[in-house]
Structures are given as structure tokens and as C-alpha cells.
Amino acid sequence: MLELGAELETRNLDAQPLSEQELNDLIGKRDYKPFLYSRNESYRSRNMAKQVSSRQDAIRLMSKNLNLIQRPVVVRGDHMVLGVDVTAYMGLLK
């Protein structure tokens, strides 16, 4: 987004991890599954595609293992883009 001329407020998750409440608020009423980073080794080794029993379990796991969170998360108003998607970023700038 910076390359597109947008100013961003950023957060270093290594220094300031998201709490369960913050993740819950960020996800809101959306499906939690797109927020899980399916390419992460922990995701695959835990077989999370089939074994995450609930939204709250997923949020708890993401808050303890930030590598399970799909990033970047770019929010503008009510719109959100997960992961690297330049076309979607462009849509946020309109």
C-alpha cells in the first residue's frame, strides 16, 4: 500500500501481539477462516482445515501464535483486505 501512495497505521505484531478480544473485534461478524494463514506449518501440522472446532478456538490459537494470522490485514472504513492483493488495495483507495 505504501508503494501505492497510501499512508498506513501499522502495528508490529512481534512487539504488540493482538489479544483475543482485539482479534474478535477485528474479525467482527466475518467468517474467521480467511484470517487463518493456511500456508503456516502450525496450521498444517494441527490439521486446522478440519480440526478447528470453533471460532473462539481459532481466535485463541491466533492470539497465541501470530504466524497463524493471514497478513497483512488492511482496513479502510468497513472494508478489509487480507494478504497481499494489489488489486483489492487499489479498490480501497478509490
Image (cartoon, rainbow, N blue to C red):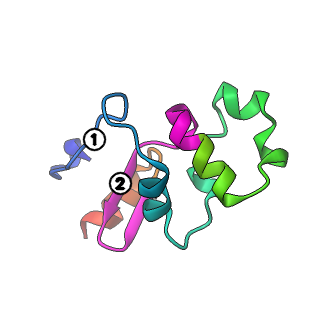
Q: Residue 58 at what x, y percent from top left?
A: 65, 49
Q: Which residue is drawn at 33% across and 60% down?
A: 75
In the rendered structure, does residue 11 fall within the stretch colored magenta?
no
Between residue 79 and residue 20, name the one nearer to us.
20
Numbered disc 2: secondary structure:
strand
Q: Which residue is drawn at 44% across and 44% down?
A: 84
The reply to whether residue 66 is in sight is yes
- Name, please, the residue furthest toward the right: 50
Q: Is residue 17 left or right of residue 50?
A: left
The amino acid type of the residue labelled 2 equals Val
Q: Residue 20 at what x, y percent from top left?
A: 49, 51
Q: Residue at x 20, y 49 (%)?
A: 9
Q: Which residue is drawn at 44% across and 50% down?
A: 85
In the rendered structure, does residue 78 fall within the stretch colored magenta?
yes
The reply to whether callout 2 and callout 1 are in contact (CB within 8 Å) is: no
Q: What stretch is highlighted in magenta?
A: 62-81
Tell me, for residue 11, which label it has, or none.
Answer: 1
Measure the C-alpha gap from mark 2 to mark 1.
11 Å
Numbered disc 1: secondary structure:
loop
Q: Residue 43 at what x, y percent from top left?
A: 70, 34
The amino acid type of the residue labelled 1 equals Arg
Q: Mark 2 points at which residue?
A: 74
Q: How crowded is mark 1: few (under 14 residues within 10 Å), some or many (20 or more)?
A: few
Q: Residue 41 at what x, y percent from top left?
A: 68, 25
